[in-house]
Structures are given as structure tokens and as C-alpha cells.
């Protein structure tokens, strides 16, 4: 890890950039130079570590567990300002882009906005910089890494399978087992949402039922977190999302997996799962009250069409509206026994169809912005005919992500994959550009091994 002097320089550059943004307009050369200097040092330091965590503890400033000298009086005002705003910790993750640092500095300098800084950063797509309070006993590392995230995800899928089979056998699913895995997933949504969302993009159909349960839970908590919901409520949203389809344990497999259009009688049988799910969850002790509500409502549209029918006048729960978006999105993009998953572009076109009564339009718009045009983990073809994996999204331009090129123009594997920003120049004077998404199975590439 870097020496104390370099870490001290990091905090000084952050303070100087923020001070400049307070005094001058965003386009002023002094502001731009301040951000450039901060971005350059962050890039250098993040080549040695997964994240930079700056903590403000009383009069002490600590970076990645190294305390800076108290003689750094120039930082006193910066630290005091952050403490007054209840910002005790700033985490910068590997992969952070200069645009994110610029947005962070400008928003940090803006004291007039009525919105919380964390909310503004979320709304503007800053995903590799987070702020918060220090909790020495409970806070795990800021970025667990893909291997750790995958372990939590796989455990969640196994737990979902156990819950499903328990309910199918006629017993009550164990809420404590579900709560335990929701706790782990909720932490990852806050710490490494990028890796977790990348895992949900796997289009496997051999255990679709259980991955779908987990994916809908993750996608729902990501939406809720973007709305600044945290703590017990965030976890209750995740729990309800995990259990939303539990009523399908009573649906015959020949109906669930039928490749052709359902008959009227088969559709009636399929519709019954929302009622069955609510019954199963209501009679399960220690089940959060939100879970049976979402199980019952998640196929109702904004105008209350859909099913179940004839339910009278009611307002759909916020969690229901969020889960409905996650449910349809994951179902459309996932590979099933009877059909291939649809591309992100096709899924987006279906879900955002004009005048559709299916979704809350404001929530759907936020979800589309959250997921991005080419979600992290997507395999893409570039205009150079190279194949690449999306590793980071641009904070403001969904068409131009950061990618890792893994196959050359001839289709041969690249020994040392090249990370490029598609908004910068590529071969010759032409910039790299993403042309289309590619099915990983069609080219025998596992995107996760490159993340």
C-alpha cells in the first residue's frame, strides 16, 4: 500500500478540488485541474488496492487504516465540514472514472441543494464513490470482490431452492433462512452492486426458478436503494421480492414450462399462484407483513388490470410496483427451457412501450437508468469487430461504457485483455463503440472470469 505521504496528498487533493468547486464555476480551469490531479492520483493508488476508504474520526483522518499526521492542519477545515454534514467515510472503488470524481466534487461543494449528498450521487450515476457513517463493528470491506460476491449469490440460490422445496412439500418456508441471505444480499447492494447485478445477468435455465427468485430480490433492493431506502425496510423489500412467486409451488410443471400459448384453463391455473402465494406466506410464522401483499399484487398493473381479477379499488404497494418491474425484466432476459432470453434492447423496448399500463412510469425510468443500456457483465461486439466485456458504465452516457477487450478481430482470445473507454479514441482516429450485445454461449465466453 502507498506510504502515508501519498495518502495525505490524496486527501489534500480532494480538499483542494472541493474548495475550488466552491469558489469557481464547474468549467473554470482551476476546478478542472483540481479534478484531473485527484483522478490521476486515485488511478495510481487503485492499481495497488481495490478501494480507498477515507475516514474522519474526531481530529484524525484515516486512509485505508493508516492515520495521517495531525500536523496536516490544512485538512482541518475539510474534515470539520464533512463531520458537520455527518459524512464520516468516503469510499472510492477501483474502476472509478474521472467523470464520477468530477460529479462527486461538484456535489460535495454544493451546500444549497435540499437533497442529501448520497441521493444526488445516486441520481447522477456515481456508483464507485460512496459516503456514509463509520461502523467499526459491522462494516465489512467496501468492495468484497467478484469471488466473494459470487459465493453469496450462490448461497442465496441454494437457500431459495430449499425454501421452494419446503413449501412444495406442504411445509412452511423458514423465514430465518430467508432473512439471513437477504441480509448478505442487502449489504452487497450497498457495497458492490455492480458485481451483484452482473451475476443476475447470467441466462441459465437449468435452475431458473431459484436464480429468478434471487435476481428479483437483488434487482428490487437495487431499485429501493436508489430511492434511498435503507435498513430494515430495504431488507423487507428484498424478502418480499425473494418470495413473490412462492405460490408457483402448486402450479403443475407442464403449465409452468409450456412453450406454446396457454389455454384458458391453463391460464386460470397459472393465475392461481398469486392467491396461493399469499396464503402460504400469511400462514407462515414470523413472515414480514409485506411479503403476502407483494405475492398477491405483483401481476396487477397500474390500472389494476392483470390478475387476480375483481379486487376492488386499491393502491398498489410501492414494493409491489418495484418487484413487478424486476420480475418482468428478469423473466424476459433469462433463458428458459422453451426459449432464449431476449437482448437488453428488446427487453427495454417491450417494458417501455408507450401508454403501457403495466408499470409505474417514473419507477421504470429510474430502473432503466439504474441498469444501463449495456449492464456490467454484458458481452458486446465493438465496431472494430473485437469482443469485449462491459466492466463499468459511463456515469452519464449509457452508449459508451468502459469495456475489457477479450477477443481480437479474428475471434482469438487475447492473452492480456485490454481495458478501454469507448468514449476515447481507438485504432487510428476512430473511437471504439459498442455495436451490439453478444450471447456468451454463442462464443463460449464466461464474462465473469474477466471481472
Image: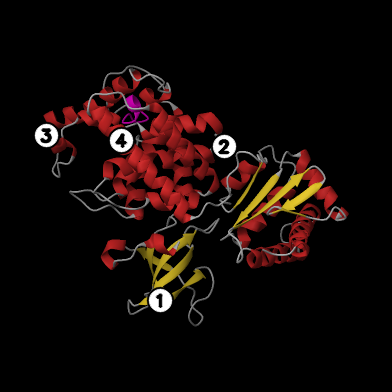
**Residue numbers of the magenta segment:** 295-303
Q: Earlier in the sequence, mark 2 or mark 3?
A: 2
Which residue has dot 1 on it?
414
Quadrant in the picture for residue 296: top left
Which residue has dot 3 on it?
263
Q: Earlier in the sequence, mark 3 or mark 4?
A: 4
Separation of marks 2 and 4 at Cα, in angstroms = 31 Å
Looking at the rendered image, the disc whose residue lies closer to the viewer, 3 or 4, is: 4
Separation of marks 2 and 1 at Cα, in angstroms = 41 Å
Separation of marks 3 and 1 at Cα, in angstroms = 50 Å
Which residue has dot 2 on it?
228
- Please rate how many residues cluster around mark 2, counting C-alpha atoms within 10 Å: few if below 14, some from 14 to 19, many from 20: some
Q: Earlier in the sequence, mark 2 or mark 1?
A: 2
Q: Which mark is residue 162?
A: 4
| Element on which disc 4 rests | helix
Q: Looking at the image, do the residues carrying marks 4 and 1 touch, with CB atoms under 8 Å apart?
A: no
Looking at the rendered image, the disc whose residue lies closer to the viewer, 2 or 1, is: 1
Q: Tell me if residue 417 is in the magenta stretch.
A: no
Q: Earlier in the sequence, mark 3 or mark 1?
A: 3
Q: With 52 as the anchor, is 240 left or right in this view?
A: left
| Element on which disc 3 rests | loop
Q: Residue at x 16, y 37 (%)?
A: 253
Which is the main secondary structure of the residues drawn in magenta? loop
Q: Earlier in the sequence, mark 4 or mark 1?
A: 4
Regarding residue 355, the answer to whether it shows in the image is no
Amino acid at each position: 500500500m502507498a506510504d502515508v505521504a501519498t495518502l495525505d496528498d490524496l486527501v489534500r487533493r480532494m480538499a483542494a478540488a472541493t474548495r475550488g468547486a466552491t469558489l469557481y464555476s464547474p468549467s473554470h480551469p482551476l476546478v478542472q485541474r483540481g479534478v484531473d490531479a485527484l483522478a490521476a492520483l486515485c488511478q495510481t493508488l487503485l492499481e495497488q488496492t481495490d478501494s480507498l476508504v477515507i475516514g474522519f474520526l474526531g481530529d484524525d483522518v484515516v486512509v485505508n487504516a493508516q492515520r495521517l499526521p495531525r500536523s496536516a492542519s490544512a485538512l482541518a477545515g475539510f474534515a470539520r465540514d464533512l463531520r458537520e454534514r455527518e459524512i464520516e467515510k468516503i469510499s472510492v472503488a477501483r474502476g472509478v472514472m474521472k467523470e464520477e470524481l468530477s460529479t462527486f466534487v461538484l456535489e460535495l461543494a454544493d451546500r444549497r441543494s435540499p437533497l442529501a449528498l448520497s441521493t444526488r450521487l445516486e441520481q447522477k450515476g456515481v456508483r464507485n464513490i460512496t459516503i456514509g457513517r463509520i461502523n467499526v463493528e459491522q462494516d465489512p470491506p467496501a468492495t468484497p470482490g467478484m469471488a466473494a460476491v459470487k459465493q453469496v449469490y450462490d448461497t442465496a440460490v441454494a437457500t431459495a431452492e430449499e425454501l421452494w422445496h419446503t413449501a412444495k412439500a406442504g411445509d412452511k418456508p423458514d423465514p430465518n433462512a430467508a432473512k439471513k441471505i437477504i441480509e448478505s444480499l442487502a449489504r452487497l447492494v450497498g457495497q458492490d452492486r455492480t458485481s451483484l447485478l452482473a451475476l443476475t445477468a447470467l441466462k441459465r435455465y437449468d435452475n431458473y426458478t431459484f436464480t429468478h427468485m434471487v435476481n428479483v430480490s437483488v434487482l428490487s433492493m437495487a431499485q429501493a436503494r436508489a430511492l434511498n431506502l435503507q435498513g430494515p425496510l430495504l431488507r423487507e423489500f428484498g424478502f418480499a421480492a425473494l418470495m413473490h412467486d412462492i405460490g408457483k409451488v402448486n402450479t403443475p410443471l407442464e403449465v409452468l414450462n409450456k412453450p406454446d400459448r396457454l389455454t384458458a384453463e391453463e391460464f386460470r391455473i397459472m393465475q392461481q399462484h398469486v392467491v396461493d402465494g399469499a396464503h402460504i406466506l400469511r400462514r407462515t410464522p414470523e413472515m414480514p407483513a409485506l411479503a403476502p401483499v407483494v405475492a398477491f399484487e405483483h401481476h396487477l398493473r397500474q390500472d389494476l388490470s392483470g390478475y387476480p381479477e375483481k379486487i376492488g379499488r386499491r393502491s398498489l404497494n410501492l414494493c409491489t410496483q418495484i418487484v413487478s418491474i424486476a420480475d418482468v425484466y428478469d423473466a424476459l432476459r433469462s433463458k428458459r427451457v422453451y426459449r432464449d432470453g431476449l437482448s437488453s434492447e428488446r427487453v427495454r423496448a417491450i417494458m417501455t412501450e408507450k401508454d403501457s399500463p403495466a408499470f409505474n412510469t417514473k419507477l421504470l425510468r429510474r430502473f432503466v437508468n439504474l441498469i444501463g443500456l449495456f449492464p456490467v457483465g454484458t458481452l458486446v461486439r465493438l465496431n472494430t469487430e473485437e469482443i469485449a466485456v462491459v466492466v463499468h458504465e459511463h456515469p452519464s452516457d449509457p452508449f459508451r461504457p468502459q469495456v475489457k477487450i477479450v477477443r481480437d478481430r479474428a475471434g482469438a482470445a487475447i492473452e492480456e485483455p485490454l481495458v478501454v473507454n469507448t468514449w476515447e479514441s481507438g485504432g487510428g482516429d476512430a473511437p471504439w463503440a459498442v455495436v451490439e450485445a453478444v450471447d456468451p454461449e454463442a462464443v463460449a465466453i464466461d464474462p465473469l472470469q474477466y471481472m
